[in-house]
Image: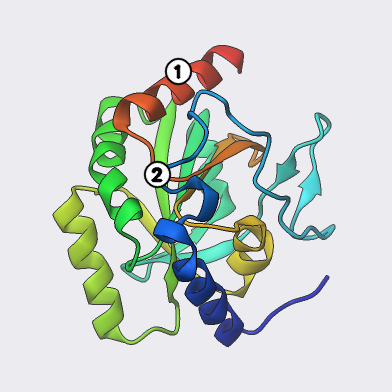
C-alpha cells in the first residue's frame, strides 16, 4: 500500500479545483443521480484498513477528527443503515450549492435509517485555525449541520484516493461497505430519490 504525505493531499485538492466546476465530469453535467454508479474508483485497500465484503464492495475503515476536533472512526457507519458521505471543498461552488439540501435531508430522515457526513478535502487535521474557522462558517451558512470530517492520511488512502472530483458523494451501508457513488452536485430531490431507492434495495 502506498501512503502519501499530507502535503500531497493539498496537491490533490488543488488539482480537483482545476477540474470543470470543481467536479470534472460530474459538476453540473453529471449523469442523473438515479443512475447510481457502482463507485467512482476503488479506494486503496489493505487487510488492516479496508477489506472486501462478501458482496464485493469496498469496506471503508478510518480514524479521523471532525471540524471541532472530536475523534471519529468508521464505527460511525454502524449508527445508520445508510450513510451519505459527501466529499467537498471550501473553494468549490457546486459543493456549497448542494449542502443546504443535504442539510435538510439530514434533518428529515430518521438518523437510524440515514445520516449525512461531510468530508473536507482541503482542510486537514494540521490546518491552521483560520482555515478551520472558515470551513465552520461555510457549514453554518449552508445549514449543513451534520458531522464534517477533516482529512488525514488514513482518509486519503481509504476514501479520497478513490475520488477524482468534488463534490463526490459515496453511499455506505452500516458495515462500511461502499454501495455506490455519484460525482457532481445534485438537487435535494435527486438525492432523496437515490437514498430512497437504496433503502428499498437494502
Q: Indicate the secondary structure of the residue bearing disc 2.
A: loop
Q: Earlier in the sequence, mark 2 or mark 1?
A: 2
Q: Indicate the secondary structure of the residue bearing disc 1.
A: helix
| Residue 103 screen position, x and y as percent | 26, 41
x 23%, y 73%: residue: 134
x 79%, y 60%: residue: 48
Placement of 37 over or under 167, stated as above or below: above
| Residue 93 screen position, x and y as percent | 30, 58
* Residue denoted by label 1: 196
Placement of 176 over or under 64, stated as above or below: above
Q: In this image, 43 relative to 163: left or right?
A: right
Q: Residue furthest top?
A: 200
x 17%, y 57%: residue: 140
- Quadrant where the image shows the C terminus: top right
Q: In this image, 183 relative to 141: left or right?
A: right
x 64%, y 84%: residue: 5
Q: Identify the mark at residue 42; answer none if there is no mark.
A: none
Quadrant position of residue 104? top left
Quadrant position of residue 149? bottom left
**Mark 1 crowdedness (10 Å alpha carbons): few <14, some 14-19, many ≥20:** few
User: Can I make out residue 40 in this image?
Assistant: yes
Placement of 194 over or under 127, stated as above or below: above
Q: CA distance from mark 2 to mark 1?
A: 22 Å
* Residue denoted by label 2: 28
**Mark 2 against mark 1, which lies toward the viewer?**
2
Placement of 162 over or under 38, stated as above or below: below
**Mark 2 crowdedness (10 Å alpha carbons): few <14, some 14-19, many ≥20:** some
| Residue 39 screen position, x and y as percent | 67, 41
User: Can I make out residue 112 in this image?
Assistant: no
Amino acid at each position: 500500500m502506498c501512503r502519501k504525505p499530507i502535503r500531497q493531499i493539498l496537491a490533490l485538492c488543488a488539482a480537483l479545483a482545476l477540474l470543470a466546476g470543481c467536479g470534472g465530469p460530474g459538476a453540473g453535467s453529471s449523469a442523473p443521480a438515479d443512475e447510481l454508479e457502482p463507485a467512482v474508483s476503488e479506494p486503496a485497500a489493505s487487510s488492516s484498513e479496508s477489506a472486501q465484503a462478501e458482496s464485493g464492495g469496498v469496506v471503508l475503515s478510518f480514524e479521523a477528527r471532525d471540524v471541532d476536533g472530536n475523534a471519529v472512526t468508521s464505527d460511525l457507519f454502524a449508527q445508520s443503515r445508510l450513510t451519505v458521505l459527501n466529499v467537498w471543498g471550501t473553494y468549490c461552488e457546486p459543493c456549497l450549492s448542494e449542502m443546504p439540501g443535504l442539510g435538510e435531508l439530514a434533518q428529515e430522515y430518521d438518523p437510524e435509517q440515514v445520516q449525512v457526513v461531510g468530508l473536507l478535502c482541503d482542510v486537514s487535521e494540521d490546518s491552521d485555525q483560520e482555515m478551520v474557522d472558515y470551513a465552520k462558517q461555510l457549514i453554518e451558512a449552508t445549514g449543513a449541520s451534520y458531522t464534517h470530517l477533516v482529512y488525514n492520511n488514513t482518509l486519503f488512502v481509504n476514501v479520497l484516493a478513490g475520488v477524482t472530483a468534488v463534490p463526490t458523494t459515496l453511499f455506505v451501508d452500516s458495515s462500511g461497505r461502499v454501495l455506490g457513488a455519484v460525482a457532481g452536485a445534485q438537487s435535494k430531490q435527486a438525492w432523496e430519490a437515490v437514498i430512497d431507492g437504496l433503502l428499498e434495495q437494502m
